[in-house]
Image (cartoon, helix red, strand yellow):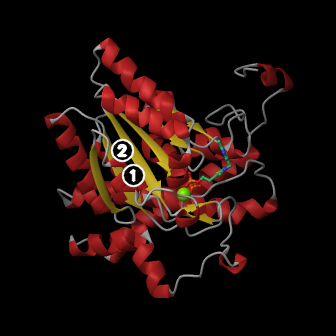
Amino acid sequence: MNSRDEALRLYRKLLLARLSEEKIRELYPSNEIKSPVHLGIGGEAIPVGVCHCLPENSKYFGTYRNHTLYLTLTGDTDGFFAELYGRASGAGGGKAGSMHLMAPDRGLMATSAVVATTIPVAVGAAMAARYRGSDDWVAVFFGDGAMEEGVFWESLNFACLHKLRILFVCEDNGLAIHSHDTTRRGFRSIPESVGGFRCHVLSGDGSRLSTVVEKTREAVTRMKKDSQPAFLHLTYFRFLEHVGPKEDFAAGYRPAPTEAERGGRDPVAIFEGELKSLKCSRPEMDAIRSELAKQVDASSRKAQAAPSPSPPDLLTDVFS
Ligand SMILES: Cc1ncc(C[n+]2csc(CCOP(=O)(O)OP(=O)(O)O)c2C)c(N)n1
Ligand SMILES: [Mg+2]
């Protein structure tokens, strides 16, 4: 982190995502949000940190666990909540729902419910950038489970062969729904396996925003020096169930974390500790929190009151 101002800008982004998802947790039981929601609590530092380090005109691709990616790139809580409520004013006109949020004008080109599907599309975007001679950077976010899809390896191979300017970002929570990594993988470790390809491989704790920033900057520097793709392997703890607003430690497939473990894996708590050492006071952080909470509250209320799309809208912007 270069300065206190920069850290506070990042804190706002981290907190906007957290407060938005906490609001979803509060509202979801009323059953008015019909879209399934894959909450990213615990993993927010990854999109916030990576997007912070890439140039303005970069192109991004992601998964269904995309809320932080959308919010960090757009800051648009109005369009976000309206989309979750299926309203005409939503980011996708009310038809995308949580899993297909996009904002091409802010560089978010596609996110998808289907595991690993945006990876080859992102490689295509990097290839297109090369073909056109543009300086666009491309980043694609995916879960560790996506690495068990053949298309991941084909895409990585192609990107390395053609030395494309693309950052592969693996958001590794060690889980695919309820399955632990050790029950799914024939390879020993993610960095070791990707290390056999001609790309820059960097690993780190994705719960720590400062680590994400440091690793992304290092990846960018290395890519500028030696034009190969980069692979960022960032670990984090998924605090909630795979899909939905609740914790699921009672389900029995993983133990509940202790309070100390929670604190050590919560990106917001960790970053607040770092802010203190940059001389940011608790009242200063609380003021940011209450300003953002008001924004989130206003956007969610607006969304609830907004009109749904009209029947003729059903036939626009859809393909079959
Ligand atoms: C092609 C495909 N296969 C299976 C599924 C069902 N599915 C949805 S999420 C998921 C787990 C993916 O895990 P990971 O990529 O690690 O992402 P995470 O949910 O942990 O963020 C699976 C298997 C799917 N959506 N698409
Ligand atoms: Mg996973």
Say which of 291 and 308 sits in front. Answer: 308
Say which of 66 and 293 sits in front. Answer: 66
Residue 82 makes an appearance in the image: no
Residue 38 x/y as whole percent? 63, 55
Residue 144 x/y as whole percent? 50, 54
Q: Residue flagged by tag 2: what amino acid is it?
A: Cys
Say which of 223 and 191 sits in front. Answer: 191
Q: Indicate whether 164 appears above or below 235.
A: above
Q: Indicate whether 106 appears above or below 129.
A: below
Q: Residue at x 74, y 40 (%)?
A: 86
Say which of 54 and 27 sits in front. Answer: 54
Callouts 1 and 2 close, C-beta under 8 Å: yes
Q: Disc 1 versus disc 2: distance between alpha carbons?
A: 6 Å
Q: Is residue 49 left or right of residue 103?
A: left
Q: Residue at x 68, y 69 (%)?
A: 246
Residue furthest right in the image: 311
Residue 48 disc label: 1
| Label 2 lies in ligand 1 vicinity (Cβ under 8 Å) | no
Q: Indicate whether 274 appears above or below 177.
A: below
Read off the residue under disc 2. Answer: 51
Crowding at mark 2 (Cα within 10 Å: few <14, some 14-19, many 20+): some
Q: Is residue 106 left or right of residue 150?
A: left
Q: Residue at x 70, y 80 (%)?
A: 250
Q: Residue at x 51, y 41 (%)?
A: 62
Residue 45 makes an appearance in the image: yes
Picture quarter with the N terminus: bottom left
Secondary structure of residue under mark 1 = helix
Count the numbered circles shown: 2
Q: Residue flagged by tag 1: what amino acid is it?
A: Val
Q: Quadrant of residue 162?
A: top left
Secondary structure of residue under mark 2 = helix
Crowding at mark 1 (Cα within 10 Å: few <14, some 14-19, many 20+): many
